Amino acid sequence: MQSIFILSGSVHSGKTTRLIKWLKDKNNVQGIISPIIDGKRFLVNISSAEKRKLEIDSFSSQGNVIKVGKYIFDKSVFEWACKIILDAIKTNPDWLIIDEAGPLELQGEGLAKAVNKVFSENVSHLKTNVIMVVRESLLNDFLNHYNLTEKDINYFNDSI
């Protein structure tokens, strides 16, 4: 792996918006961003711009769900996003974005399958730069969970 960049901030502080602006003049970037559209969380495939609604309104929706606080998420959308990230690893893009690693990922749910693969020794030979979005309040837990230290990471800035 060339470099790991962490984009960290508090909840609803504009992390995804910063990434969207940063992406405008970049090529060979793959992964997932998670904007809020019309008040609901979506996951968007950076390569194709395909989006899927992650946040659902009630348990009565079809499929499996994960409830976190007041939010209810569609597990199938996480599975779709994991596949996008895992497929991206195989193509070795210049940049891979994962927006975001939160409480679910630290508990082995959500995007954990893909995040775990990105940080496994099996893909440490890749030349892909990884941008991980991590909530500020979970940054130390994230670093500990993936056995990363401050010297293993860079902090994202808009000029990279």
Image (spheres, rainbow, N blue to C red):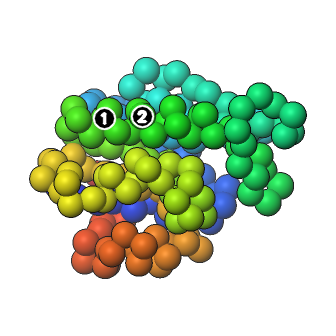
Establish if 155 lies above or below 82.
below
| SS at badge 1 | helix
Which residue is painted at 41% across and 78% down in the image? 144
Q: Nearer the viewer, residue 8 or 117?
A: 117
Q: Which residue is mark 1?
A: 88
Which residue is painted at 22% across and 32% down in the image? 91
| SS at badge 2 | helix
Which residue is painted at 39% across and 25% down in the image? 47
Q: Which quadrant of the rendered structure holds the N terminus?
A: bottom left
- Which-is-in-front pick, marks 1 and 2? 2
For label 2, count other residues whose C-alpha is less than 10 Å away and answer few (under 14), some (14-19) or many (20+).
some
For label 1, count other residues whose C-alpha is less than 10 Å away and answer few (under 14), some (14-19) or many (20+).
some
Residue kind at label 1, given as amino acid type: Ala
Q: Which residue is mark 2?
A: 83
Q: Nearer the viewer, residue 46 or 112?
A: 112
Return the x and y of residue 122 as percentages of the image width and height. 20, 54
One can see residue 20 in this view: no
Establish if 48 lies above or below 79.
above
Which circle marks residue 157 in the picture? none
Q: Are marks 1 and 2 in contact (CB under 8 Å)?
A: no
Mark 1 or mark 2: name the one nearer the start of the chain.
Answer: 2
Return the x and y of residue 103 as percentages of the image width and height. 60, 64
One can see residue 118 in this view: yes
Which residue is painted at 77% across and 46% down in the image? 72
Q: Label 1, label 2: how many angstroms apart (C-alpha)?
A: 8 Å
